[in-house]
Amino acid sequence: MSTAQRVVAGLTRRAESLSTCESLTAGLLAAAVADVPGASAVLRGGLVTYATDLKAKLAGVDERILAEYGPVSEETAAAMAAGARETCGSDWALALTGVAGPEGQDGHPVGEVFIGLARPDGSVVVRRAGRDGHMRYAWSAHEDKQMAVLVGDRGQIRAWAVESALELIHGELGYLAE
């Protein structure tokens, strides 16, 4: 069973819903969930906020967050997730923002990806995307340090970001024993 199937099954059992807000993945996360039979019971919808201004307009990300931290940041991922949860009226929301390449962006290396997860209680958790065997260390001029980033071509980075997001909610839902 795929991670997306486990997430849909778990949300269905809990009678809870999910929405997405995506930048670098441009709808791939919502599509991965929608590919699962029965997804209509849990998937409320998704926002594609590829352009920075749409993060504010569609997801309600405060423009001060975007100005201070930029579109690729923990703070923006958290705000995107919270905004998607509110805009779509879902119990849970996943957000993805990062750099898929082929070049870095504003001091962020290719493969740097943040996942925001808004929970039913209104709290938000943010993680860097990571996949065993698909990571390397790169210098982030933005953070002035080395960090683990996804490695691969543009398509691989986007696919691994989606899988990392699904693994995050899967773990939060407590299905790792399935």
Image (tube, rainbow, N blue to C red):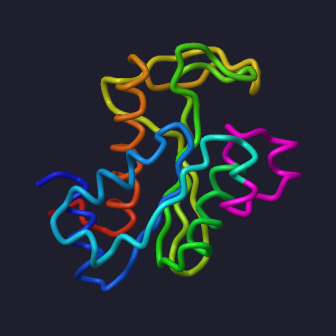
**Magenta span has 105?**
no
Foreground residue among 126 and 36: 36
Q: Residue at x 53, y 40 (%)?
A: 128
Is residue 61 found left or right of 101 in the rendered image?
A: right
Residue 82 percent coordinates (x, y):
63, 67
Relative to 63, say whether 83 is above or below.
below
Foreground residue among 51 and 139: 51
Quadrant of the image for the N terminus?
Answer: bottom left
Q: Which picture quadrant has residue 84?
A: bottom right
Relative to 96, say whether 124 is above or below.
below
Q: Residue at x 53, y 79 (%)?
A: 89
Is residue 41 found left or right of 157 in the rendered image?
A: left
Quadrant of the image for the C terminus?
Answer: bottom left
Residue 176 percent coordinates (x, y):
24, 60
**Magenta span has 68?**
yes
Looking at the image, which residue sits at the far left? 1
Relative to 31, say whether 106 is above or below.
above
What is the magenta range?
A: 56-74
Residue 88 percent coordinates (x, y):
54, 73
Q: Residue at x 30, y 68 (%)?
A: 174
Q: Which picture quadrant has residue 160?
A: top left
Is residue 125 found left or right of 17 in the rendered image?
A: right
Query: How many dots with numbers?
Result: 0
Q: Residue at x 47, y 71 (%)?
A: 92
Residue 81 percent coordinates (x, y):
59, 61
Is residue 80 found left or right of 142 in the rendered image?
A: left
